[in-house]
Image (cartoon, coloured by chain):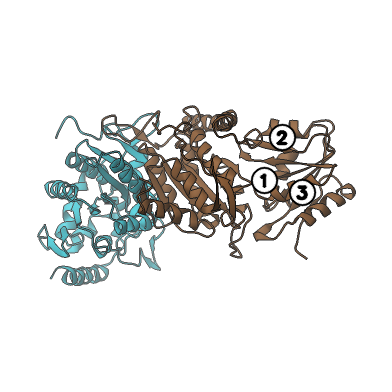
Chain colours: A cyan, B brown
Amino acid sequence: MKKDELLAPGHRTCAGCGPAIAIRMLLRATGPNTVICNATGCIEVTTTQYPTTSWKIPWIHVLFENAASVASGIREALDMQGKSDVNVIALGGDGGMMDIGFRAISGLWERGHNVLVITYDNESYANTGVQRSGGTPWHASTSTTPSGSASKGKDQWKKDMPAIAAAHHIPYVATASIAQPFDLDKKVKKALSIKGPKYIHIHCPCTIGWRFDESKTIEIAKLALDTKMCALYEIENHKKTLTYKPKGTPVKEYLKAQARFRHLTDEDIEEYQKRIDEVWARDFE
Amino acid sequence: MTKTVMEGSLATAKAAALCEPDMVVAYPITPQTHIVENLGKLIAQGKLKSKHIEVDSEFSALSACVGGSAAGSRVFTATASQGLALMNEVLFAASGMRLPIVMVVANRALSAPINIWNDWQDSISARDSGWIQLYCETVQEIVDTIIQAYKIAEDKNILLPVMVCMDGFFLTHVVEVLDMPKSVSKYLKKYKPPYAILDPKKPQTQGPFAFPKPYAELRKDLSDAMDASAATIKKCHDDYAKLFNRTYGNGLIEEYRTKNKKTIIITMGSLAGNVKEVVDKRDDTGLLRIKCFRPFPKKDIMNALKGKETVIILEKNISLGTSCGALFDEIRSIHCNIEDTPKILDYIVGIGGMDCRTDDIENIINQSKTKKDGHIEWLMEK
């Protein structure tokens, strides 16, 4: 751990916050020559209470759904000023990037700005009290998709954002997890070494949204990888390469560790395992 | 200076180009499209060294302007109608972040029903967004106002975004004889942001989260800057006049043949041209054209209306739920508690591109004697 971290302590994220860990790892990889353009969300609201800030690098927040468009403007302005060496990163949670801000990101990728887009995916609108998002996994109970006698939580499968990124044929797409910090570091550095639009999707457990003990954040992140709930890979030149080999732990262990899935019966979990195996076979075999 | 003949949109583009923006952000919408097309052409021909960003929506257009401006660049964009409505959330962020963006609005009606023709509902509906709003009568005035707009917006004590409003089709698609300045470098210097920009050598946080007290303080600052901008708008107008020898009233309002007239017509934008033609032939009526709608020049308007008997407002917008247009309520409110308040009549005209012709204006003036104070009427085509 470096003393001179670029995200200063004292911010107001929850104890055990996965996204906060992700941001610290991210900034260690980017270094100080970086501008962060942050969508509204947990990280924005907890790190910049006026007149204080946790950011030791230039940082801007404008709205919920326009981080990628603002970042496009910043990138072109800096290039016009001869500052092409400065990294520009559009950063947001799954709500800000996969749902409400998606058009702006698709536009950025299509236009080809030299910007790294990052989603810290904690699988709900956590900042507003854990509502369902496009990033929420199947059957998770959220405040807008609560489980009950007539509901098993969210009815839909998680939106495949990295695949959508890849469909824009951008030079670099990767997934990362706070459980694999060296892998995350490597991917961010690699992304920033490539000119053009890039995408990294970081899986970040959320202690209040997923409902597990705040000491278990990394453990949950690891379980997501080993149960194949989250896959780590890179997509370059249309080729997908796995960067972590999961142990194949039954998904039951992941689901049982979080209260958002506690309504699921043994049959539900069996069905869950079946679908996970199908998706894995489709995407990686 | 030699006169040239030019389409309004081309003249608008050339005026924007004279200001040498670092970035031109473009998204098409009728009747604005010719403006960004012409800017794109100037960039493609190498005549304008700006970065041309063609975005995915008007929402992204203004967002990219915010990013560019926050990074210290001079930016330009243009929109209309639904595009301005889509930008609404960004409008408030741009002014709250005190970014000197200049945007042309080619005024057009708002859906529904969908309608591509001119009225002012789009920009009037954005009147509380913290943008200075300047409405122009002619293409010449658009050219001169865009150049002044950067000077106003970038003033260290103001730092507010400016909307330059031009009537869709009436000004965007009209061909006008005008003077196009060859250079504005004596008037408008290269933009140097006085405060925060996004620079890793001097890291700063922009657009933070604020609790009620600092939030209210910052909003008050914004409101004060808006009020203070009236004097800056006048000064930028006067300084421009010294170099280019053209004036538009005092930069905020224009009084046209109002001396010794008992009846005053108030309007904005290109409709003032029709009104001028009417009042030229009458000895009872003058014109007060409001050029600057935000900040609202209350004192200037009040002084201009002192001692007048009848005020007829012609306005191309409706503030739904109040039965009247926005100008009517605002002009009446400044006459509250004042003796000898004139009779104030409101005519909703030109909605969705309907005509408001000189004979319509004549009829309205002729009938005004029989109308009571507070009379509101829609002018409909026969």
**Dot label at residue B268:** 1
At which x and y percent is residue A105? 33, 55
**B305, A253: nearer the viewer:** B305
* B339 lies above or below A223: above
Residue B79 visible in image:
no
Residue receiving disc 3 = B346
Q: Give the foreground label among 2 and 3.
A: 2
Q: Write the residue at 20% across / 50% down.
A: A195
**A267, B177: nearer the viewer:** B177
Residue receiving disc 2 = B301
* B345 lies above or below A143: above
**Judging from the image, what secondary structure is the residue with disc 3 in?**
strand
> In the rendered image, which quarter is residue B55 located in?
bottom left
**Is disc 3 surrounded by few (<14), some (14 to 19) or many (20+) residues within 10 Å?**
many
At which x and y percent is residue B64? 39, 47
Q: Give the foreground label among 3 and 1.
A: 1
**Judging from the image, what secondary structure is the residue with disc 1 in?**
loop
At which x and y percent is residue A47? 33, 36
**B208, B179: nearer the viewer:** B179
**Dot label at residue A155:** none
**Judging from the image, what secondary structure is the residue with disc 2 in?**
helix
Residue type highlighted by circle 2 = Ile
